[in-house]
Image: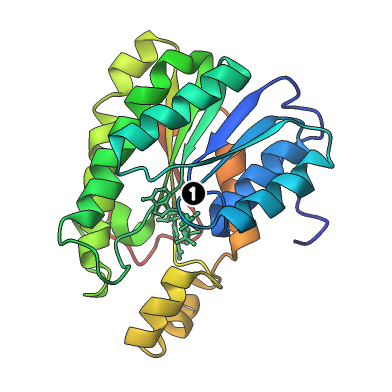
Amino acid sequence: MPDHLTPLAPGSLAGKTALVTGSSRGIGADTVRYFAQAGANVVINFRNKAPRAEKLAAELRELGVQTLVVGADLTDPDSVRALFAEVERVFGSLDVLVLNASGGMESGMAEDYALRLNRDAQVNVLESALPLLGDDARVVFVTSHQAHFIRTTPTMPEYEPVARSKRAGEDALRERIPALSERGVELVVVSGDMIEGTITATLLERANPGAIASRREDAGKLYNVAEFAAEVARAAVDPLPVDNTRLVGDTASFAAE
Ligand SMILES: NC(=O)c1ccc[n+]([C@@H]2O[C@H](COP(=O)([O-])OP(=O)(O)OC[C@H]3O[C@@H](n4cnc5c(N)ncnc54)[C@H](OP(=O)(O)O)[C@@H]3O)[C@@H](O)[C@H]2O)c1
């Protein structure tokens, strides 16, 4: 990660605790690293990649923060219950929850898997976290422009079911904004274009050769993992944006609703 990418002031999150779902790799891993660099204690969650999660945790402990690693399949309610029981036991409360974990393009999954992970599991994770989220807590839902704008802007057929399930998840979370506000909890949706160097982008490029170059040309620039993660991390601390939405990068190719 380039040294100049320090989106949060050092020490600015000292004493806070942040959980990022799906933080064993990719955008989630860089996001959790930024929180730790800012002094937060962090919870790294993974589904399969325990060694990667443990390696990241060891790196972050060197920064002097407390780091908890919890494996949990977010589509399994028992697993989610156990995750938050562990967070409560170790930290007692949470200040930041980033709903980053996502999927649906994995092979061999049931037809409804994308919806179960990207909608149902997101809502369940939020509901399960609520008792731990204190006043002024921030919840960040991470999505893509291809999903956020799916109702008005078509996307690649391979990604469409994922896009629709992520938009359904976003809608279900947004419905909870009034109830969250009553408890002093804020929700921000962060949406970004295709991110260079991710597995999803690689899979889409394989199915649609030239897709990445074409998006890069249309958008002028595509963010990489570290750059997009920096936006996700900032979304956890910046003033609440209009309509609870932080759009990252160019959106000219996407039709507003
Ligand atoms: N990739 C893009 O081009 C792009 C663009 C815009 C927005 N985004 C958004 O950014 C976020 C992260 O994307 P990414 O590309 O970094 O994802 P990724 O590389 O596919 O990583 C997904 C993470 O989610 C975890 N995960 C997957 N299924 C899970 C489950 N059932 N339970 C618990 N954890 C699970 C994975 O854990 P394991 O490693 O253990 O499997 C991994 O840590 C997503 O919300 C995505 O929609 C991505």
Q: Position of residue 57 (x, y in %)?
A: 70, 45
Q: Is residue 209 left or right of residue 37?
A: left
The residue lying at 15 percent from left, 62 percent from top is: 111
Q: Quick one: which residue is furthest to the left in this view?
A: 111
Residue 257 shown left or right of residue 65 in the figure:
left
Q: How is the image coloured?
A: rainbow
Quarter of the image where ligand 1 sits:
bottom left
Q: Where's residue 81, x and y in %?
A: 37, 28
User: Where, by quadrant of the figure, is residue 15 drawn?
Assistant: top right
Would you say 176 lies left or right of 222 here? left
Looking at the rendered structure, the secondary structure element under dot 1 is loop
Answer whether residue 237 is visible to the viewer in this image.
no
The residue at 70%/54% (across/down) is: 55
What is the quadrant of residue 194 in the picture? bottom left
Image quarter (top left, top right, bottom left or bottom right) of the N terminus: bottom right
Residue 162 location in percent, x, y?
26, 60
Decide if ligand 1 comes within 8 Å of the CB at mark 1. Answer: yes
From the image, tell me which residue sits under label 1. 22
Residue 256 visible? The answer is yes
Residue density around tag 1, few if under 14, some if 14–19, many if 20 or more, within 10 Å:
many
Relative image position of residue 158 (x, y in whole percent): 25, 74
